[in-house]
Image: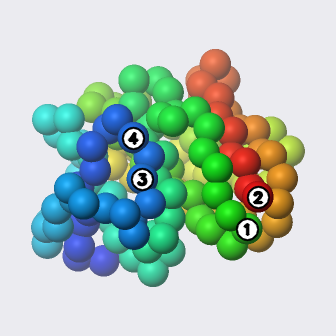
Amino acid sequence: MKRSGWTLCLGLTAAIGLGGLAAGCFSEHNPTAPAGGVCRLPVDQGVPGSVVVPIANFAFSPAEVRIRVGQTVTWVNCEEDATSHTTHANGEEWSSPLLAPGQAFSHLFDQAGTFDYHCDPHPFMTGRVVVE
């Protein structure tokens, strides 16, 4: 993922579209790891308009997101320790690399459908993207 100097501060509790961001903050510091309940996501050309799904406490939150065809979902690992995760589609439509805390992965959804996914190292972590 191409990174810029700008980062977007995200709360850990909800997935949001960046267009509706009201309480975010911007910084010129690149994150190395989330701290104090704040997860930092690099903002680049693949992120604006994304639906963001934080990964925290061994869960995708929210576990299900609904988007339109042509939108992007960005997962960001917000774990506060050294736990790494992946996002891997059960139907093999995408597979992220192992994401260390503070790293993100984006996927563009160009067709309608329901896409279930999981974390490879922690298969009990599951989620769903519904594309309408």
> What's the residue type where badge 4 is placed?
Ala
Tell me the number on the disc at residue 96.
none
Under mark 1, the amino acid is Val
Residue under pointer 4: 14
**Label whose residue precedes the other's in the sequence (4 or 1):** 4
Identify whether 112 is placed above or below 6. Answer: above
- Residue matched to label 1: 69
Q: CA distance from mark 4 to mark 1?
A: 21 Å
Q: Are marks 1 and 2 in contact (CB under 8 Å)?
A: yes
Amino acid type indicated by mark 3: Ile
Q: Residue 100: x, y in percent?
A: 41, 43
Q: In the rendered structure, are the residues bearing label 3 and label 4 in contact, judged by CB atoms less than 8 Å apart?
A: yes
Side of 3 relative to 31 (left or right): right
Left-right relation of 82 to 115: left
Q: Secondary structure at mark 2?
A: loop
Q: How many angstroms separate mark 4 from mark 2 (CA)?
A: 21 Å
Closer to the chain start, of discs 1 and 3, is 3
Q: Nearer the viewer, residue 20 or 5?
A: 20
Image spot of residue 102 (x, y percent): 33, 49
For disc 2, the marked residue is: 132
Q: CA distance from mark 1 to mark 2?
A: 6 Å
Tell me the number on the disc at residue 16.
Answer: 3
Does any portion of residue 119 appear in the rendered image?
no
> Residue at 57% across / 41% down in the picture?
86
Label 1 secondary element: loop
Is the Cβ of the residue at disc 2 closer than 8 Å to that at disc 3? no
